[in-house]
Image (cartoon, rainbow, N blue to C red):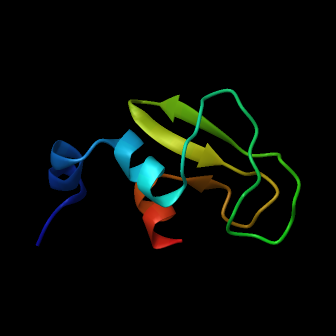
Amino acid sequence: MITSLQVLNAVSQEDIILKYFGNFEYNKYYINPWRTDNSPGCWFEIYNNSIYFKDFAYSKKIYNVFDIVQE
């Protein structure tokens, strides 16, 4: 079984986001591609050395890189 730490030792969080979300910048608003709303109220943020995609208008409010892959 492969752990999340093993994955992140082989591939960066940024590369995972680029693959499944596309280009991104910090402190910029985005539309959440996993919901039908077209309101750009989401953003990327680093907290405790992890990158999160935050969307407080959706039932799933905070995505880590593994959540992004699942979506």
Q: Position of residue 28 (x, y in %)?
A: 71, 31
User: Residue drawn 40% across and 60% down?
Assistant: 66
**In this orientation, which residue lies closer to the viewer: 49 or 40?**
40
Give the total number of marks visible in the rendering: 0
Residue that lies at the very extreme toward the top in this rendered image: 27
Residue 35 placement: quadrant: bottom right
Decide which of 34, 55 is in the foreground and name it: 34
Q: Quadrant of the C terminus?
A: bottom right
Up the image or down, 58 lies above or below 14; here it is: below
Q: Tell me where residue 18 appears, x and y as whole percent.
A: 46, 48
| Camera-nearest residue between 7 and 24 | 24
Residue 4 is situated, as x and y percent measured from the top left of the image, at 24, 56
Quarter of the image for residue 41 reads: top right
- Residue at 86% across, 65% down: 37
Residue drawn 11% across the image and 73% down it: 1
Asked if residue 17 is positioned above or below residue 51 in the image, the reply reads below
In this rendering, would 9 be left or right of 29?
A: left
**Quick check: 6 left or right of 22?**
left
Judge whether 43 appears above or below 7 on screen. above
In the depicted view, which residue is nearer to us: 66 or 16? 16
Q: Would residue 24 be found to the left or right of residue 11 on screen?
A: right
Residue sitting at x 66%, y 64%: 60
